[in-house]
């Protein structure tokens, strides 16, 4: 098996490990919601980036059906978002929270850039690790604010007894 | 504007407008269904194209994606919102089954028409009843999962 397929397997295992770490077994509803929110953003964003020629994925799952990196965008990054959200340090000040967000999305971007550098799973055409950091940071921010709002609405409704 | 382009635009517009039917109290359910349903849709849609069973000759974002982006990502999830909202919970099991299989059949007949008369979809090994079974499966999964999601909070 080529190196690319080992990386795909590693990303899948990494996603499972992240979901386990985030407590998906104990909080299945919350984690499912976070996961599908992550997917709803990262998968179309990736398709659009491929469409506009920013990145390419020469080796990938579903090679006939898509030009995008399914494992990274549909499975791995959503799992990173689940863990990111579950461990978000709400009790810390804005500086601590900002540092946490920059660190997690920075690690994600570093991994993305590493995968593009050492494997044929990704190729940056008009893109860089820095762009990846920005994209991840912005998507995680939007997704986190939305999930906070959604969970608050649910709680409100429960309190009203509806 | 070609027939296909017009139909895709009409499908998106129709789906957006149809969301106005969702009662205010059901907005959280609407969001959950739309977010959740794209997951099984993409997996099934990508698999069908990968296996060479289906082609979408006219599609959005054609150079990046060979499945129907508009259908997997928006139109079918919105259809599931309505299927969930009007689901006859109090009815007997055969009626509930007929509800899902009936709506699924209507969608299947519509898709078979698209296959015959437009370039939106081509069956290259696919059969109309594959659509019927997979759409009913998605409906069922959406209804079950949404009910479970809202039945209780995580402990």
Image: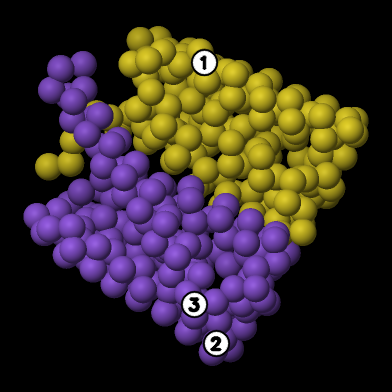
Chain colours: A purple, B yellow
Q: Is residue A56 above or below residue B122?
A: below
| Quadrant housing the C terminus of chain A | top left
Work out whether residue B98 or residue B53 is closer to the camera in this orientation and state it: B53
Q: Seen in the image, is A64 located left or right of residue B137?
A: right
Q: Is residue B122 above or below residue B92?
A: below
Residues at circles 3 and 2 in contact by the CB criterion of under 8 Å: no
Q: What residue is disc 2 on?
A: A117
**Which label lies toward us, 3 or 2?**
3
Q: Residue at x 45, y 65 (%)?
A: A134
Work out whether residue A151 or residue A124 is closer to the camera in this orientation and state it: A124
Cα separation between marks 1 and 3: 41 Å
> Is there one chain holding both mark 2 and mark 1?
no
> Is there one chain holding both mark 1 and mark 3?
no
Q: How packed is label 1: few (under 14 Cα within 10 Å), some, or many (20 or more)?
A: few
Q: Seen in the image, is A161 located left or right of residue A62?
A: left
Q: What residue is disc 1 on?
A: B20
Q: Mark 1, chain letter?
A: B
| Marked residue nearer the N-terminal end (3 or 2) | 2
In the figure, residue B88 lies in which quadrant? Answer: top left
| Quadrant housing the N terminus of chain A | bottom right
Q: Secondary structure at mark 3?
A: helix
Q: How packed is label 2: few (under 14 Cα within 10 Å), some, or many (20 or more)?
A: few
Q: Mark 3, chain letter?
A: A
Q: Is residue B21 visible from the viewing direction of this image?
A: yes
Cα separation between marks 3 and 2: 10 Å
């Amino acid at each position: 098996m080529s190196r690319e397929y080992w990386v795909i397997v590693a990303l899948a295992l990494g996603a499972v490990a992240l979901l386990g770490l985030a407590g998906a077994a104990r909080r299945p509803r919350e984690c499912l919601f976070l996961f599908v929110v992550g997917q709803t953003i990262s998968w179309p964003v990736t398709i659009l980036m491929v469409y506009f020629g920013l990145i390419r994925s020469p080796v990938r799952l579903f090679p006939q059906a898509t030009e995008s990196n399914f494992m990274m965008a549909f499975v791995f990054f959503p799992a990173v978002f689940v863990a990111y959200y579950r461990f978000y340090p709400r009790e810390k000040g804005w500086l601590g929270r900002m540092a946490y967000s920059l660190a997690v999305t920075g690690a994600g971007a570093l991994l993305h850039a590493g995968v593009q550098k050492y494997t044929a799973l990704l190729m940056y055409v008009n893109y860089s690790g820095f762009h990846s950091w920005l994209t991840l940071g912005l998507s995680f921010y939007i997704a986190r604010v939305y999930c906070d709002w959604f969970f608050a609405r649910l709680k409100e409704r429960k309190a009203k007894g509806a | 504007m070609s027939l296909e382009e017009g139909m895709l635009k009409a499908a998106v517009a129709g789906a957006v407008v149809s969301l106005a039917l969702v009662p205010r109290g059901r907005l959280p359910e609407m969001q959950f269904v739309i977010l959740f349903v794209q997951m099984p849709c993409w997996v099934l849609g990508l698999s069908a194209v990968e296996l060479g069973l289906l082609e979408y000759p006219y599609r959005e974002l054609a150079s990046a994606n060979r499945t129907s982006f508009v259908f997997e990502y928006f139109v079918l999830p919105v259809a599931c919102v309505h299927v969930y909202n009007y689901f006859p919970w109090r009815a007997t099991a055969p009626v509930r089954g007929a509800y899902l299989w009936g709506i699924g059949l209507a969608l299947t007949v519509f898709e078979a028409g698209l296959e015959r008369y437009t370039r939106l979809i081509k069956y290259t090994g696919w059969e109309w009843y594959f659509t019927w079974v997979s759409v009913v499966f998605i409906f069922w999964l959406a209804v079950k999962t949404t009910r479970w999601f809202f039945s209780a909070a995580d402990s």
